[in-house]
Amino acid sequence: MFKKFVATIVATLITASASMAADFSGKTVEWLIPFKAGGGSDKWARYYAPLLSKALPGNPNVVVKNCPGGGSTTCTNQFASTSNGDGLTIFGDSGSTKFPYLLGDQRVKYEYKDWMKTIVLATPTGGVAYVSPKTGYKTPADFKKLKGRELKYGSQGATSLDIIPLLAFEMAGLNVKPVFGMKGRSAGRLAFERGETNIDYQTSSSYLKVEKTLVKEGKAIPLFSWGVVNSEGNIERDPTFPNLPHFAEYYQQAYGKKPAGPAFNAWKSFLASGFSAQKMVFLPKGTSADIVNTYRDAFAKVLASDEFKSSSKKGLGVYKQVTGPAAEGILKAAIAADPKSKEWLKNYLTKKYGVKF
Amino acid sequence: MIDTLLEAFVLIFSGAHFLYLLFGVCLGILIGILPGLGGIVGFSILLPFIYGMDTVSALAMLIGLIAVIPTSDTFTSVLMGIPGSSASQATVLDGFSLAKQGQGARALSAAFSASLFGGLFGATVLTLIVVVAKPIILFFGSSELFMLGILGISMVGVLSGDSFVKGFLACGVGLLLGTMGSSPATGEWRMTFGSYYLFDGLKVVTIGLAAFAIPEICDLLRKNKTIATKEEPLGKGWAQGLFDTIKNKWLVFRCSVIGTMVGILPGLGGSVVDWIAYGHVVQTSKDKSQFGKGDIRGVIAPESANNAKEGGGLIPTLLFGIPGSGSMAVFLGGLTLLGIEPGPSLIEENLKFTYVMVWSLALANVVGAGLCFALSNKVAKITTIPYGILAPFMIMIVCFAAFQVTRSIYDIYTLVVLGAICTLMKNYNWPRPALLIGFVLSDTLETYLYQAVQFYDWNFLLRPGVIIIFIITILSVYLGARNSKKITTNQTIDIKDLFKPTVQNLFIGILYCFFGFAVFDSFQHNLLGGIFPGGISIIMFATLNYAIFVNKQWLSASVQTSFSSDETVDLFKSFSWILLLVFLNTLFGFVISIFVFFIVIMKNKTNLPNRKIIIISIAALAFMLMLSHFMVLDFPPGLLQYFMKLPWPLN
């Protein structure tokens, strides 16, 4: 009697899961985010999830599932080992997932090229650096004053996305001492507001808030944005902050020449993967073209919707969200850092911050 | 301000807003009762639904959820000895002792009424202070937070009772466990034994379950009776619990202040608040003899503090967009979805929404405490269920909760290893609270010490805030020491005793190796990465050596049991039940193992007929499946799932 009971249950379950099709009605899509709840990637996914739910055929319930660990490598490895998805599991990465991949972190067991055909969305972002007026810096003309003193920066770690600000400050000739152990960019901002640090940066959506408060009150002066890397590999102004010079412009203004050299090349290629192509959505490798296209269409629908247009600036900044085959090109650019740049950066991190690879 | 406050009040009661609040409260109660699940899980369930909801309803629902978790988590802490969430670990100490004495109802009623007051206090402070709180938050920088960490650590002294050295060493273990994983200053990985799992360090939920739940489960399995050993009608004690809270009204007030303050300061984290409140009550009480054995004040203090914390925690979240805890981080995400931006606008043009949150917080506390009161008569019956039936259920919940920490099977292995060590600690009177305090403060101490030195050099010690907190620390240590009576024993241990094969010696041996290894490991790193664990492990290692070879009194055990004694054998037997589930899980995954495990353990521990055993097992399984389905939680997989693709729920 008991055996029969179990057999019935198992049989029901098998038939239930077998009736899968491109229509997702009544299903639940799990959106894996390899970061903590409440972080930037989490907010991004939670912003998109309900819109995606409306755009997918059958309006499945889209839930965001956080699986942090190993600086995002643990969950990414797990996702990389799944293949031929049924479209009910999708994955969102970030620049912090790409950096360990590019730097050859021993924990990385994933290969971005596997997802070339299954990328369904790419979301760029940017970042803006700012300093405290107590440094004596009010306008770019005060750059010398800034150069002459020690600046403190609250950092999350030398191998995190902070590679970009730290290297930018160094190339600009600023004497910046990073203080590590910040638990996120918002902790960095708090330390800045307390006056413990005097130089800081925020990614675009957070900087929009800084602009409204600290900058307006005169407690922070913007320096430059990182800029965005365009398809030709050149840096152009950040569309969210068109009035701010980007790093290369700022450098040229200060030194009368364009930045160049191995440091700048490495910086540029890591900027491309860390910011200009920061967050992406993938289906598992080997997922059928039908399902991939269903998702690409759904995201195209999201991007064209009025709801997205009216709410996206606040949530994402003004960056062109890319889906469809064009996203493949962005992924290619994001992992295109040449071996020389990668080597240079590794050496730099080891020499300057004692990072072991 | 008053107008807005009243406007917000009317708003909550108009339309369906109040119903959403109720829904949030009900979900919050459920999540609080389930161990290991906290506000993060609750918010994650609700967030998909708030999109497009009207702002007031959504806020009422979210706040309703978070407000009652520290009220209802008391059920599990008091009745089962399992921390219902990481903010009520300290409640277990006296709450569960009271439940075992048949006074569960009294403990619950005192806890709920204290929670109610704490919650209302937090809401009031939020109302008054939110307009002027900014300078307070900015005043507490890295130096001050470090010093607050020291104040927290000083509680170890009073919580260790008569065995200060054991408490000191246990705290050292906690501090060192807290340094596992990446170093805040250099990012180096410490004490990871090459395991990627340990790269991220251990999590407080795992340590809490290992320190309290596992040892209690073992103990109860060994006795195999009901949790409440005295026969007392459960209905009794309600009035007494209420009366206890009223009698200790100033304690409730002080702990509410503590809770709110800890909540306001981002960076201390919610899991410290109950311990600080508990330390405070032990410290300021004349008669400390009953703490840990069932003193009602030990329930009232943490419960008033952990509810008050939520009101305080909203202040940095709303003003700066800086969350003080994981659940506040998710709440912040929810605000973004609603189009509310944290920052000055919430005390200017959007003040209305802030006060909607205040009212929701207050109402949710009232409704939540009321519902908990109403439920508790039924729920308290748990303590009269024979342990043979309750134990498999508790082991199942604990393993499932531990697995949710990082969703890795290693979460469960870690739970078992630490659980074994804490079981030894419990049996040989090593204070586990000291270990937990060390653990929750380890990262705070190391990070802020390093940052403070970088920002201010050692001059940070001269900052006014640091000096004030330092004076408070000295005062609190003095107050704590003044009332405690010294216990001297004439018992000494011979070195030879230490090599006898006894369980206590096994534990001391483990400790010796652990400290020794920590010393070794800390020398493998850069100066900045190794100095904190290095300093602590050297002090601990030296203390342990001194205790063993020179002092000979500190570690003299009250109980020296050999491996072959009945007591030890029983202990190992009951622990092996937990191992059985873990073993089955490793092979077959959670769902299959739970079913088998329930049948085996009930067959062994109860006299129930087979039919009933199967019905209970199916009911337990159904409960887990529903939980997993509605909360979108995974089950731990086993080898079977690794080799075969199975349909839900067997995957």
Image (tube, rainbow, N blue to C red):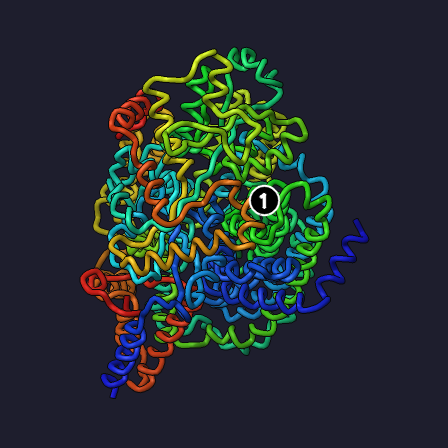
Q: Position of residue B445 (x, y in %)?
A: 47, 35
Give the quadrant of residue B182.
top left
Q: Residue at x 73, y 61 (%)?
A: B11
Badge 1 element = helix
Q: Decide: few, some or many residues near mark 1? Use Cα within 10 Å; few <14, some 14-19, many ≥20.
A: many
* Rendered position, B87 above or below B33: above
Q: Residue at x 42, y 36 (%)?
A: A276
Residue B369 in view: no
Which amino acid type is shown beneath numbered disc 1? Val
Front residue of B543/B391: it is B391
Q: Position of residue B270 (x, y in %)?
A: 53, 48
The residue that disc 1 covers is B262
Residue B239 in view: yes
In the displayed structure image, the side of residue B536 where residue A86 appears, left or right: left
Give the quadrant of residue A85.
bottom left
* Rendered position, B646 above or below B378: above
Front residue of B18/A116: it is A116
Q: Position of residue B118 (x, y in %)?
A: 64, 55
Q: Residue furthest left?
A: B643
Tell me the quadrant of the picture where the C terminus of chain B can be found.
bottom left
